[in-house]
Image: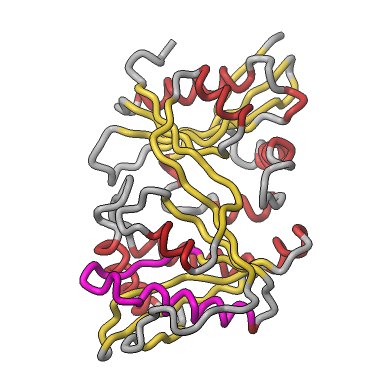
Amino acid sequence: MGIAIRPYVRGQDDGIRVDLYNRAHAEDDDFVPSTVEEVRRWDQSPQEPQRHRFMAELDGDPAGCAFAQVDPDRADAKGTMSGPHVPPELRRRGVGTALARAAFADLLSRGMTQVEVQELDRADINGFLESLGFTPARAFSRMRRPLQDLPRGIGESTEAEIEVVEPTRENLKVNLVIENEAYKEHFNFRPLKLAELEFWTRMYAEDGTAFHMSFARVRGRPVGYLWYGFDPKDNAHLKRNQGWLMDIGVLKPWRNRGVAKALMLAAMRHLESEGMDEVRLYVDDTNVTGAHHLYERLGFVLAYREIVRRKDLVLSAK
């Protein structure tokens, strides 16, 4: 029967997709298995209508999955691919290539001329994506730091007041203004929408994540924000007490004045008080703000790296 690629059928394929994804990533760093209930909630994302999902079957049995996404708010004609997600025992049999080609054809049909994919910097993944014609475009680091012996007096702002706030609609509106202004010069920037922030905070609550949001204010004016927290379910699976600094932004006139340090140190002390032993974050290695170097000065070290790879689609429809 060979390999067959078909569109994803919601409801029918949810459990199959979760099983394939969990098996495909079981050995990845920081991986926590998903459940059908979780993915169904997250599939209510504002971006979901733009994600076209595909299922692969090998000799009639489920063998892999992938999705292709178009962002209508982007100014360029660049789509993204997630996957292919293929369990180890089914790799090197053409399943991943067939899924990728289905994603390429879908993106081309929607007017895209390039595709990006972000995956772990690992030899087997690198080799597979290179065979499809992808080339590296950007590197991102997952960094970690123990929460013991947090420093003081290392240049953190003394004029910024750090306040943990509730993720109300009004506070999310303030956060949105800062975030879109702070990130407008960053890689792959496109303005976020309030509906997206509201969706994420709602999902954190429904998933049981201990989520916190803080503002840095100078003379009452918000000039920076930080999202941070931890997931008790994830930590139970990983057998560690690990928190995350999820998202940080500081308005350009207030950079290099210790505001980010103040936000991060306050958050890390908060996480330590909640029983966390370690904190992790995610950073663009060539971020225009030089954030990577700030994190190193705060004691963060590399845990592992991910690579954004890019491919022109004009010659990829075959």
- Colouring of the image: secondary structure
Tell me which residue sits at (43%, 23%) in the image: 104
Camera sees residue 35: no
Q: Is the magenta stretch mostly helix, strand or loop?
A: helix
Tell me which residue sits at (54%, 38%) in the image: 119
The image shows residue 113 at horizontal and vertical percentages of 31, 25
In the picture, the quarter occupied by the N terminus is: top right
User: Is residue 73 magenta-colored?
Assistant: no
**Numbered circles on residues, count:** 0
For the residue pair 21 and 5, the one nearer the viewer reads as: 21
Instruction: Give the farthest residue toward the left.
Output: 253
What is the quadrant of residue 121 in the picture? Answer: top right
Q: In this view, does 24 lie to the left or right of 81?
A: right
Tell me which residue sits at (68%, 15%) in the image: 93
Q: Is residue 92 left or right of residue 131?
A: right
In the picture, the quarter occupied by the C terminus is: top left
Q: Would you place residue 44 above or below residue 136 in this image?
A: below
User: Is residue 257 magenta-colored?
Assistant: yes
The image shows residue 269 at horizontal and vertical percentages of 57, 81
The image shows residue 135 at horizontal and vertical percentages of 42, 26
For the residue pair 190 and 194, the one nearer the viewer reads as: 190
Tell me which residue sits at (50%, 64%) in the image: 246
- Magenta-drawn segment: 246-272
Q: Would you place residue 257 above or below residue 91 in this image?
A: below
Q: Would you place residue 50 above or below residue 149 in this image?
A: above
